[in-house]
Image (cartoon, grey):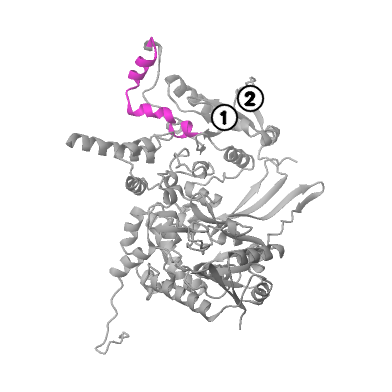
Amino acid sequence: MTASGVIDRAGLDELIAALRNGGYTTIGPTIREGAIVYNEISGTSDLPVGWTDQQAPGGYRLEHLGDGRMFGYVVGPQSWKRFLYPQRNVIWSGVVTADGWETVTPPEPPTYAFIGVRGCELAAIAVQDRVFLAAGDRAADPSYAARREGAFIVAVNCADPGANCFCTSMGTGPVAGPGHDLVLTETVTDDGVVLLAESGSARGDALLASLAAMRPAEIADRERAAETMAAAQATVPHSMDTTDIHDLLLGNLEHPHWEAVAARCLGCANCTMVCPTCFCGTVTDELELDGGGARRVRSWDSCFTLEFSYIHGGSIRQAGSARYRQWLTHKLASWFDQFGTSGCVGCGRCITWCPVGIDLTAEVAAIRASDLRPAVPVAADGTEVNL
Amino acid sequence: MAVQSPLTRKPTLAVFKFASCDGCQLSLLDAEDELLAVAEVVDIANFLEASREVRPGPYDVTLVEGSITTPHDAARIRRVREESKFLVTIGACATAGGIQALRNWKDVNEFTAFVYANSEYIETLDRSTPVSFHVPVDFELRGCPISKTQLLEVVTAFLQGRRPNIPTYSVCVECKHRGTTCVMVAHGTPCLGPVTQAGCGAICPAYNRGCYGCFGPMEEPNTAALSAWWKSLGVDDRGLVDAYRGFNAWAAAFREASDRHEAAITVRGASA
């Protein structure tokens, strides 16, 4: 039986303070530039208390509800990728010395505690774990591993899925799956906003046990949380039919719909930048003008740029249709071949933050509606005929 | 410790100015922290903004600022090219014709007649054109003004004998690297970022403004798709013409987009 209990806003403040006192750098949702983004927080006053977000393809607006809820919104333009896999990361540097050169030891990354990780985001972190760590000690990415290893994760169940959320289609939410140290379910009672806190690890157990402001969870607390999440589960508004999606997409590589998408696609790379699982990077060497020092830097790259597929003689994916197809078929199909999972967690970021509102679920549906694969003969009893 | 240059002597660097505001070459002076390092590894032979000393060519690296707008300059850029081993154009004027390329849609004689008391003394071309329209260019550095970081990268790359690492992707990538929230999605502010080349560091969106396109068209700009979205944000064809006709108005992709929207105004005007 994992530890659990009920805390209010003051209890969450105590929890955040306990993490900070334990040496964690606490990161959580904050409001900046009209959006909810992840930043360092020192308490609940930094959270978007009473705010929610309205999302549409290519549209995002904050709305003040004043309901006192601390997590009444979904995901914004950023993801935890920013902290685990920074957009620009010096992976090696060295300086010239009097008798040669020496490596500069990089500063230790902070030990993070992430507050408010949603189910889709837990799934996204698990996807990136497979990309960066699953190859084992020899091939694991040391930069990602150093940031990921000690990270403490406080998940939040999504009570109000956003308009572009399709986590239920991808099996990642709105109830947070495994991979967290604690999970919170926020509900509104006559006495105000309360959080049912349930532990998912020994570290979570210990943290909950240390909270003075926590009271035991009663049956009514659990029922209220369960009802809230059952309602959320039923109202996830968006969806994507993933039936046979691997073969559907890879069997339609010459579908004319790729051109139709390319006519709308800006090739701007926003979808890949906001995607919590997109992991492509480019490595550049930077040398000081006077030759006194050098750095090897890894930064976020995107399959939507021409440089990305540049090899001797030119870029392989010249056409916008080829680049969109590469992204979508990798994300939803060949990712299975490469990593054993889908690369999509259904968070909807690529839909919201596409400046022209391209919705990948609609593009998949369009291809499905005019599937160009040769029909498989079906016998009278409905079974496929193997020719 | 100086890096081993492909040349056995210090390479010479020259800066030439054509029709421009000097802002781009001032970026080199602006690079205060790095200027001494630059002066250590190159021999500055001609840079009037920094020194009155002018030494004759040939030059190893020449930075050219400004567009070509007069017959005199059209002849001068050829001489500069002849004297330069590696010619880099710096800024929107030199690479696209600059804001002064707005004349390209008008009759320049009307301007000269209006501005000058005796316009018969004015000898000017009817178009403002980029340097590459007149002579071969080895590298074009975008921006109005250019980024000093990119300028140093080009100079460093030349000295190290490698290709400059200057991305040609959209401003959006810089916004996302920087952590700036998209002003078009989150605020409904029309932004040229998705069709504009990175390099500025995505300054304007960081201050809640849409991108003005200072670095010119990105590698594969889809202006039609962006224009359609701008229209849904309430910008009409006139507004789109004005947006594309900025500092990089004469760059092919922006020029064509602006012409499309101008034609749409004309068609509607004629049918009204």
At numbered mark 2, what does the secondary structure look like: helix, strand or loop?
A: loop
Q: Are marks 1 and 2 on the same chain?
A: yes
Above or below — where is B28 with respect to A227?
A: above
Q: Is residue A93 left or right of residue A236?
A: right
Residue with the mark numbered 2? B50
Q: Quick one: B233 or A106, which is closer to the camera?
A: B233
Q: How far across and how far down the image is residue B61, in percent?
A: 59, 33
Residue B122 in sight here? yes
At numbered mark 1, what does the secondary structure look like: helix, strand or loop?
A: helix
Q: How far across and how far down the image is residue A168, in percent?
A: 42, 73
Task: Pinpoint the chain carrying mark 1.
Answer: B
Which residues are the magenta region? Answer: B91-118
Q: Farthest residue toward the bottom?
A: A381
Q: Is residue A175 magenta?
A: no
Q: Is residue A280 left or right of residue A236?
A: right
Q: How far across and how far down the image is residue A141, in percent?
A: 63, 65
- Amino acid type assigned to the residue bearing label 2 in the image: Ala
- Amino acid type assigned to the residue bearing label 1 in the image: Gln
